[in-house]
Image (cartoon, helix red, strand yellow):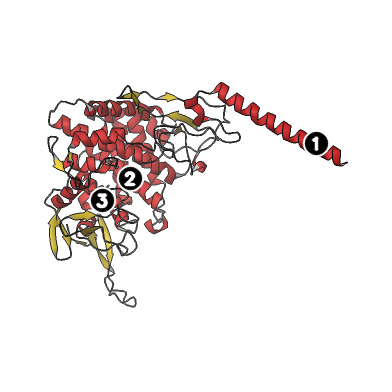
Amino acid sequence: MKTTLLFKTILAFALCGLLFAEEEYTISEILEPEDMAEIYVPNEVDAPAKIIPSVKTEEDSLILPGDIPVKPPKLMQMDGQLVLVQYSSRSQKQQPAAPPAPELPQQQDFNTMNETERLETLQKSIQAVLRANTGNRRGMNMQNHTPHDVLLMSLPYGADARVFRPNPNVDPRDRNAPKGDYIYSMGVLCWNMPCNGKTLLRSDGTKVIARVGSGYQRQPAMLAAAMAMSHVVPDYELKLGNNAYTLAHLIASERMAVSKGMNLSMALVALSFYGESKDQWKNELDETWDIEKMVTNELNRSLDQGTPDVTDWLLGLTAAVKLYESENRPVRGPLALAKKQLQTYHDFVLSIQNDRYLWHPKFFLYKGFNPNAFETMYSSGHILRWLVYSLPDKELQNPQVVRSVMSLTTTVNRVKPETMANAMSPKELEGLAVSLHALSVYYQRTFGELPNATPAAQQTVAVR
């Protein structure tokens, strides 16, 4: 009995060794060394294509049957030069067909309209959605929401954005007592008023610094970039206690903070608006910087193509290229490579739209549809915002772009009016805010100045 058991044990170990040896041989025989990171995992959807960046896969629930992995454009180092590699579809095993998604409201009617009717409908639809989703209507207030929340919800409305300031001395038994007032969001942030107990700005004694972290800015220079996209003048007042500064002081601080290897996407947006292409400055390490050097840094930075990091990156490159073109400066060297990258991404982004003309929650790693409105808004809002910000004027009437704008408008409209900002997760609130910003940018570039989205009957305190 013992001999038989021993024999079976030895046989089992031998078989295991053969299996492992066979598996290793098969993999090394079929795949090239550079493909080793893309091994198919049984019982799972194909892992996302490994781009230059470190791709995060913790949100595997966002990948549904039928979603198609894709490879975004990328830069590769070849013979000491950065070379742009065109995108391509990625082969995959046959996936089961996705269940049919419900038709979006108004989608069929919109598709049967002529071009003039579409634009008229689109203009009215964007106006209605922007009016319905102001910070006032979504319950944004300084007591419950952080500076980051207030900053996000100010993006679609710029200097006209408002937030509610509760009256801390109100008697809850007095129904006629004023519960508070509405105040300009930009003023709240720039006058460093506490939001959920946090103030966005600080000073080290010599300069104004915008905090980065939970509840503050998600990344450096977000406040400066938001002010730039809202066309706020550099002499706009900033206050830290009894000390008065201007936005120009914050811009000077952002210049000094520029450093090799860091994320400079929002800094590029801000400094391209508040400066000139020929500007040079010293950072805190006494290194000389300019816009061209910032672009070079961004082209060499690793990106996560499955997150907003990639669309922020595109925004920064777009702002720099626009600056050079507005000054009629030659677009060459890293700027030319950035422009080529942007043009390639324009084609790529339109090629990976789903049948709703929107994008996958994993941004540039998959093509497919997700029925969750907030997940769709999060990715599609970020992507469409960059697209309508960067496209030439004539391309804004591209039928794919027009349908994207209308489809995102319809998706935002699915968020129930009674859903307050307090009930949204940080990601959901960001998706809503950035989607509204995308619609706002498209409206201004296509139809002109936005109508005032805040009811005139609401009292507003003029802190700007």
Left or right: where 370 falls relative to 154: right
Instruction: Please state which amino acid type lies under the numbered disc 3.
Output: Ala
Give percent across and percent down for residue 374: 42, 46
Q: List the residue tagged with mark 2.
A: 434
Q: List the residue tagged with mark 1.
A: 8
Give percent across and percent down for residue 260: 26, 40
How many residues crowd mark 2 within 10 Å: few (<14), some (14–19), many (20+)? many
Asked if labels 2 and 3 touch by Cβ distance under 8 angstroms, the answer is no
Assign a secondary structure to mark 3: loop
Q: Is residue 463 above or below residue 392?
A: below
Q: CA distance from mark 1 to mark 2?
A: 64 Å
Which mark's residue is nearer the viewer, 1 or 3? 1
Query: Is residue 319 visible in the rendered structure shown here?
Result: no
Q: List the residue tagged with mark 3.
A: 453
Assign a secondary structure to mark 2: helix
How many residues crowd mark 1 within 10 Å: few (<14), some (14–19), many (20+)? few
Give percent across and percent down for residue 140: 32, 58
Give percent across and percent down for residue 47: 51, 34
